[in-house]
Structure formats: C-alpha cells, structure tokens
Image (cartoon, rainbow, N blue to C red):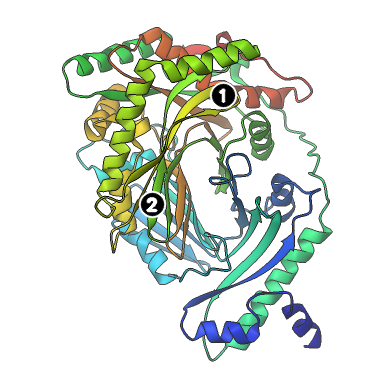
Amino acid sequence: MKHLKELMANFYPDEDKFADLSQNHSLVPVVAELPLDGRKSVIGIFEDLFYQCKYAFLLNSGKGKKINARYSFLGGDPFLRFKYQDGNATIWKKGKTFSEKSDPIKSFTAILEEYKSSYFSYLPHFFGGGIGYFSYDLVHYLEPSFGIKKDGLNLPDIHFIFVDEIVAIDHLEKKIKFICLAKTNVKQVDQIYSNLILRLTDRINQYHLSPSKEKSFNNKKKIVIAKEAFQSNVTKKEFEDMVRKVKTYLKEGEIYQANLSQRFEAEFDGDPFILFKCLQNINPSPFSAFLKLDDFFIVSSSPERLVKVYKNRIETRPIAGTRPRGITLNQDKSLSNELLLSEKEKAEHLMLVDLERNDLGRLCKYGSVKVNEFMILERYSHVWHIVSNIKGILKNNINLKAILNACFPGGTITGCPKIRSMEIINEIENISRGLYTGSLGYIGFSGEMDLNIIIRTVLINNGKTYFQVGAGIVADSEPELEFYETFNKAKAMQTAIQNMRNSSKKTEYNYTKFNLIKCN
C-alpha cells in the first residue's frame, strides 16, 4: 500500500480532499496533469491509447483560434451507450440492454440527470459525459409535421457513448490531463479513490510506454472507388432544377434563403482513421472529430460550431459566405476581398446572424445576447468563409430540450425562416439528410456542451464513404454557380479520399473527376 500512497501524491485531489468532496458531490473526478510530450501529436496519442477500442472518440480542436480550440478530448471504452432509432430508445449498461418507445430527449436527459455533476474549477470544461451526434433527421421528432424520408443508410437519429475517463490535451498550456471520475459513496471512499488512482496510473503508463511518433500503418486494404469516381444522388441538371424551385418560393415571399445539398458516395475498403489523418492534413478545422461507433465511422473536419454552453453562458458561431481559395497569392487575396465586398454575401450573412440572435434570444436573459465577432474572414484549405460569433446569458432552468428546440438544426444550413425552409428542403431534396447538418460533440455531466454542425464530414458505413455538401440559395442565386459552390466545399473530402489511394502523390482537384450519374 506504500507504493500506492506514493502514487497518490501526483494526483489531485488527494485522498483527504476527495473524501471531503464526496460529502457534497455525487460524482468526483481525479486528474493527473503532465507536460505534453512535444514528440507526440494528438492523433498519435489517440492511436496509442484508444484507437483499438470498439467505441472511441477524438474531438480534435488543435487547429484554430485559441478561444475556440484550446482543448482536444480523447477517450473510449464507454460504460454506457445510448441510441435512438425508429422510435426506440436503447441503452446498453453493465452488460444489460434496455429498450423502450419513448421521448428520445427525455430518455437521453435522464442519463445526464443520473450522473449529474458539479463544475470543478481544477478541470477543463469537459471531464466526462456523452460524446456522439444528433442526426439532422431528429427534426422529424422536433417538428412532427415533417414527413420522414428514407436514405437507405439506416443509422440512428441519436447515438452517444458515455465515458467516465478522458484524456484532455491543453494546447494553450502544452499539458496533457488524465481524468477519471466515479460515483461517490462515503462508506467506500478509500476504495473508490484507490481504484481511480490505479486506472489513471495504468493510462499514464500506457502513454509513457507508447511510441513517440505516430504509427506507420501498414494499410494492406486498398481504397477502391467506384469507376474511379464519386457518384452523386442528383445530376447537375437536377440540382439546378432544385435551385430554381427554391427561387420560386423566394419570389413568392415564403422564405428569404434555403440551403440545398447533394450527397456523394464512393466504395471504400480501408482504414477510416487514415482517412481522418489525411483530412486533418488537408483541412485542419477547430471542430474536427473522429467517432468509432458500432460498425460505422464518422470523420469530420467541421469549421462551424452549433452551440457551446459553459456554466450559464451560451454561444453559437455561424458561417455564411463562401469563396474558393485561389491558385496564386494574388488570386487568393482577390477572392477573399471579393467575398467581403459582396453585397449578396453580406446581406445573406447578416440575415443569418439575425436568425441566430433570435434563436439565442429564446433561451437567454433579456438584453444579454451580443454579437462579439462580426463578419470575420476565416481561411480554410479550399475555401474562404465569413464567420460571426453570438453569445448570451442563459435564463434559469434552461434544459437540453429547450436548447435543441431553439438552436437545432443550425440556421446557416437550413435557411430563413427556419421552419419553412426545412419544409421546403424536405420537399425538394430526394433523400433524408441523415448525419449531414446534424450536430456532433460532447455533453458533459456538469451541463457543459460543445456541438459542431456536421459539415465537411465523411461517413464510412458498409464499405462505402458518404459526404454531403450544400449551398445557400437566395433570390439572385445562379443555379450553375450554386452547383459549383458545392464542389468547392467538397474538395477537401474528395482529395483526402483520393490521396489514400496514392499517399505519395497529392491528387489535384477537378470537378470533372466526379461521376455525375445519379445513384441507384
């Protein structure tokens, strides 16, 4: 026991403080903090610690402004899983399965309530809880009047894993934090604390003993792309006709803007995590994620936050306005200036900022909603974007359902007014959106959450990759230009998949490489 007591000296809180906290808290976390080994990347650490888990996650926020990208979170081996599909909520816990027809948000919230925790100042804003996604198709629950379309992918509308152990990478302070938490019991506090220390010690030893460089995968599986191209669910003409239909609604005054999308797919037989690494190299983004769930994988390089909740504060970060990157420096600068000076883009962005302010206004104290960043130009690998940030102070007793009702899905990927735009999307798009423009991220036991918007994201399922891209349609949109805007947004994902086929040579993007034959 002497050796264990020596180990305890490196953890916070110590045993006595843990016992004190256990008197007033149902969950208490323990953390060990170490300097980050500069030879180890976030991706390499995830490979070493969690990639072999059947269920695992990496929320990688290392690229971006420090205000949005301070922490990356890693983990696996959930103690509980939640899935909502076809009207059934299913929970896996301690080897047992529970399934029932229920209100999905009520069932989901019940888990958060069971493990509800206080905020601890010595920890990052997320130290345990649920990691997963809300599919866009959850709108059929939030707005029951919408008809339900099938997309053939048969994925859950909600899928979260719940963890009581995470690794947090602090990019600002260059530290790595190993965190475990457990339900407290004053009669067994010594044993509970000892078990947490042993779990953390095992994880730290695994970190120290792992290679200092990222593994070089021997990817024996080859990537196979159907007819060496991607297939879309619509032809160019069909997409342009969709734009014209939206413009009819615009002309009639029913909406001010609507987002239309198309989905691409390709055959895939390879390691999804290599695809994630390729996408991170090509298009690093502040709300990136890798999720390993059942037999499918989500590879996301999203630049957009849907909603962040921290204590009693909430914020959203809408993106509206896009131009492709230029080939030369002069062309690149010209395109970025063109974006900022475009009256069309500025008007569209302002309209969507007002929509998001209204959404937060439903949740926040009167007068607290502010736009603290307005029309900031952000640069990504293949596009320029205009971005704003809106924040407010939450009213008392705002719960998850209220937040989803007000903010989900994001207005930038539906349109304005939101409900009517979604009805038109449901009418015009020929398949349900599934994951696309849903939301992915974490919801902590302490109530903190950070959810992205699922764009620039690849789904790997049943031997295929799928990714979806869209464009915001307004009164003066030109159908053909909107069609090509979707390709600019698809470049990074298409290039990442192509690069897996020939890792020694970058694949130049050309829209003609896409197979525009409609999928069966």
| Amino acid found under the numbered disc labelled 2 | Ile
Q: Nearer the viewer, residue 27 or 430?
A: 27
Residue 179 vertical placement versus 16 (above, below): above
Residue picked out by circle 1: 266
* Whole-number angstrom distance, CA of label 1 to CA of label 2: 38 Å
Q: Residues within 10 Å of mark 1 (few under 14, many from 20)?
A: many
Q: Residue furthest bottom?
A: 187
Q: Along the horizontal axis of the image, is 14 left or right of 202?
A: left
Q: Quadrant of the C terminus?
A: top left
Q: Which mark is residue 314?
A: 2
**Residue at position x 74%, y 71% in the image:** 201
Q: Position of residue 154 (x, y in %)?
A: 42, 39
The image quadrant of residue 505 is top right
- Describe residue 410's horizontal placement relative to residue 227 as left or right: left
**Eye-nearest disc, 1 or 2:** 2
Q: Position of residue 93 (x, y in %)?
A: 49, 66
